[in-house]
Amino acid sequence: METKKATIKREDANTYLVLEVGEAPFQIILTDDNPNNVKMVFNSLLKELKKGLFEFNLEDESQDLYNNICTEYLTQLNSELKAIYDELIDYELVDSE
């Protein structure tokens, strides 16, 4: 299983959870209630999951609310990715190398 990096990008206007996958990182806006953004990122992660199982590890030094939220979010996300990957294998939907 591959471990990918997740970071928190803090700006004046918004804060993002950044998931390093492939060439273009995915960003989930933490300061905006936009379920379509989360849905789009999750669908993109599912496409990547067909290539092989991975999990995210948060690299962030700040011990603030965003760190706590992202830590819990990544725990849930990693669990869901593992369960979905197992189903992809069961239905033979993973890409063969």
Image (cartoon, rainbow, N blue to C red):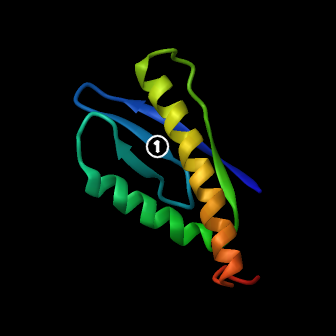
> Residue 88, image x and y in percent?
64, 75
Residue at the location (76% across, 82% down)?
A: 97
> Residue 54, image x and y in percent?
68, 56
Task: Give the quadrant of residue 93.
Answer: bottom right
> Residue 77, image x and y in percent?
54, 48
Residue at the location (51% across, 48% down)?
A: 19
Picture layout, residue 74 above or below residue 26: above
Looking at this view, is 67 or 23 the one in front?
Answer: 67
Label 1 belongs to which residue?
Answer: 18
On-image quarter of the N terminus: bottom right
Residue at the location (66% across, 50% down)?
A: 55
Looking at this view, is 15 or 42 the one in front?
Answer: 42
Amino acid type indicated by mark 1: Val
> Residue 31, image x and y in percent?
27, 33
Residue at the location (37% across, 38% down)?
A: 16
Picture layout, residue 55 above or below residue 91: above
Looking at this view, is 8 or 93 the one in front?
Answer: 93
Toward the top, the furthest residue is 63
